Amino acid sequence: MRVTIRNYQPVGYWVWDVKDPDDVCGICQNAFDGVCGGSCKEPGDACPLLFGTCTHVFHMHCILKWLEPMRERGEEGACPMCKRPWVEQVQEGASNKAADGTDVAA
């Protein structure tokens, strides 16, 4: 017996590596596996998560928008959850570029 595959449509599945998969971004309140409250239309590499050394996690666009006014005033940015200075925790094997080429290093 011989089988011929005429059509193949693979489906990919991904999840962010966070402690609680039901957790949400503390800024936009959207799920981590969804899109942020900003301009993102699709979850994934275009809307990555940034992990702080304080252990808080946010969508990239959310935390960058949060930090922007502070940094424009010459202030050190602070985590919106614990008010510690925001320092991005570099993830092992992670790139500093999002799929759209945006530099995600805070």
Image (tube, grey):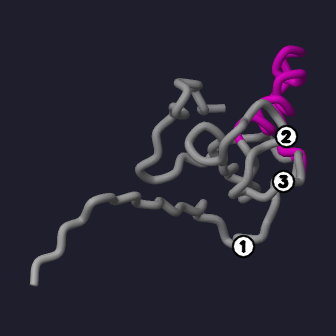
Q: How many marks?
A: 3
Disc 1 residue type? Asp
Residue lying at the far front of the rendered structure: 1
Residue located beneath label 2 in the image = 37
Residue located beneath label 1 in the image = 20
Residues at discs 3 and 2 in contact (Cβ within 8 Å): yes
Residue under the point 65% across and 65% down: 18
Estimate the spatial distance between the alpha carbons at disc 3 and disc 1, rounded to whole Å: 14 Å
- Quarter occupied by the C terminus: top right
Disc 3 residue type? Asn
How crowded pointer 2 is (Cα within 10 Å; few <14, some 14-19, many 20+) is rated as some
Identify the element where label 1 is drawn. Answer: loop
Q: Is residue 46 left or right of residue 22?
A: left
Viewer-closest of 48 and 34 = 34
For residue 82, which numbered disc appears in the image? none
- Vertical side of 18 occupied by 89: above or below: above
Viewer-closest of 44 and 49 = 44
Residue under the point 24% across and 65% down: 5
Residue 21 point in image, percent of width and height: 70, 70
> Is residue 69 covered in magenta?
yes
Residue 61 point in image, percent of width and height: 75, 34
Q: Is residue 48 left or right of residue 73?
A: left
Q: Is residue 64 left or right of residue 73?
A: left
- Quarter occupied by the N terminus: bottom left
Disc nearer the start of the sequence (3/2):
3
- Vertical side of 81 occupied by 71: above or below: above
